[in-house]
Amino acid sequence: MRIKHQLTIFNALTRFLIILAIWLMLPILIEKVVFKRIDKTLLEKEEKFIEHLDKREINDFLTRKDATETFASFSTLHNEFLQLYQSKRATNNSQSFFKDEPRVIEGERSDYRVLYYDFKYESTNYKLEIGSSLSEIKELTFVIRVFILIVLSIVIVFSFLVDAFFIEFLLKPFHQIINQKIRHVNEPEKFNYTSIKSTSTDFQELDEVLNQMMKRIQELFNIEKQFIANVSHELLSPISLLKNRFENLIQNESLNEDGINKVVSSLKTLDLLKKIINNLLLISRIDNNQYITDEVIDCTLLLKEIQEELEDRLAEKEINFKLKIGNKYVFTGNKTLLHIMFYNVIVNAIKFTETGGNITITDVKLNTNYGIQISDDGCGMDKEQLSDIFNRFTRLNFQKEGQGLGLAIVKSIANFHQVEIHVDSIQNKGSDFVFVFPKNKKL
């Protein structure tokens, strides 16, 4: 997931959690504020009522001194009530407390916030109850919650879009650096040194450092290419000169058989040295991206060509070679290099497979990617050998011919074409080499 998407999602989740917390706490906050207001109002009414105890209607009630009667007053909509009656419990100090409870007033049941006040008047204990309906408060709380939920949802959507556009704008230079520069670090000659426009000093510094780094890499790249060219000339030319001299020396009639054998041995050594140098130069050129990769290659035809080239070796060891490719697959790359890659692996399979053995090439699917598997029933390898097979000059069997560069070349070619290699092997049972091709290379 790209960083801009991660930042946008993080911001949206943070806002959502904050809004959820506010939405859950809202009823508590409303109730606390509203109840505080109701309690204050009820206390004011209590004080007002006590101040007017000498009114005629209340005095009439008090003079009757009938504990079974109650003085009651209700609002028209029953959202408030007041009740006064004699209390059987004696009280020394006037005290008030609040309680939420349901009441039935004239056949209508509703929840009220009730103020209870015990006091003494003219040597008689009374209890005063003043209630305020909570139904409107609950309805108001619900309406506020719905309203705030809608408003906050709009805020989330709007802020999400604003964040998305702002993060996209903010990270645009970063994506340009990735697409125009970092993706081409393996191609120093094609690197774009144009400065990326950015309002962020961090991205400006990153762009500047990348340009400096790639200039240094370009210099080293050119030095290495020059070195390779020098090696090709300075080493291969003397080898060719020595080879010609030894070949001419063989034709000298004055040489005896022992001398001829020594010259022939020297020629073989020169051929081996020339082959090692060429292989090292090949690896170096591959690693420096000095090959084009715009050829369209049919993998099935390529493997058939290799099979025809190796017919003599296969027949010599009586190896049963099976090419089972079920799907046609074309690949954009360098045909010569891919030929070398498959050729080296198949030659290794022939080398380490006993007479009468089997080599099978099939195509496979790995995580929707196309792959080619080369299997043999040869001597196989242990885990320690498997970890070193792609290292240069690593020889698994010193009794077999080779310089230990074949699989190193295979690995370099695979990396050059972004092809993954998976190797499984069991000693004395055989090995499987699987080449997994990238999706973007398929035509």
Image: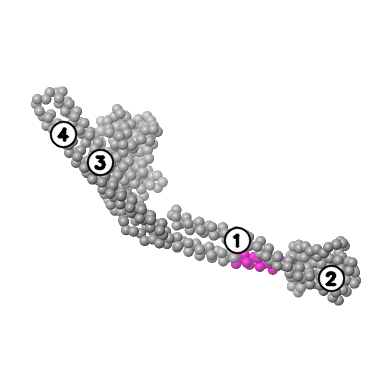
Residue 176 spot, x, y in % from top left: 37, 57
Label ID, residue 22 = 1
Whichever of labels 3 and 4 marks the residue nearer the N terminus, that label is: 4
CA distance separating discs 2 and 3: 112 Å
Residue drawn 85% across the image and 74% down it: 54
**Is 312 placed left or right of 151 in the picture?**
left
Mark 2 neighbour class, 10 Å CA radius: few under 14, some 14 to 19, many 20 or more: some
Residue at label 3? 281
Select label 4 or label 2 by which is in front: 4
Q: Secondary structure at mark 3?
A: helix
CA distance separating discs 1 and 4: 89 Å
CA distance separating discs 4 and 2: 132 Å
Was residue 136 drawn as part of the magenta stretch in this picture? yes
CA distance separating discs 3 and 4: 20 Å
Q: Secondary structure at mark 1?
A: helix
Residue at label 4? 242
Seen from the viewer's position, the closer of residues 278 and 421 is: 278
Was residue 73 drawn as part of the magenta stretch in this picture? no
Disc 2 residue type?
Phe
Disc 3 residue type?
Leu
CA distance separating discs 1 and 3: 69 Å
**Is 39 placed left or right of 222 in the picture?**
right
On the image, which quarter does residue 58 sit in? bottom right
Task: Give the residues in magenta.
Answer: 132-147
Residues under numbered marks 1 and 3 in contact, where contact means CB atoms less than 8 Å apart: no
CA distance separating discs 1 and 2: 44 Å
**Is 20 placed left or right of 371 in the picture?**
right
Disc 1 residue type?
Ile
Q: Is residue 306 visible?
A: no
Residue 356 spot, x, y in % from top left: 31, 30
Residue drawn 29% across the image and 27% down it: 399
Residue at label 2? 71
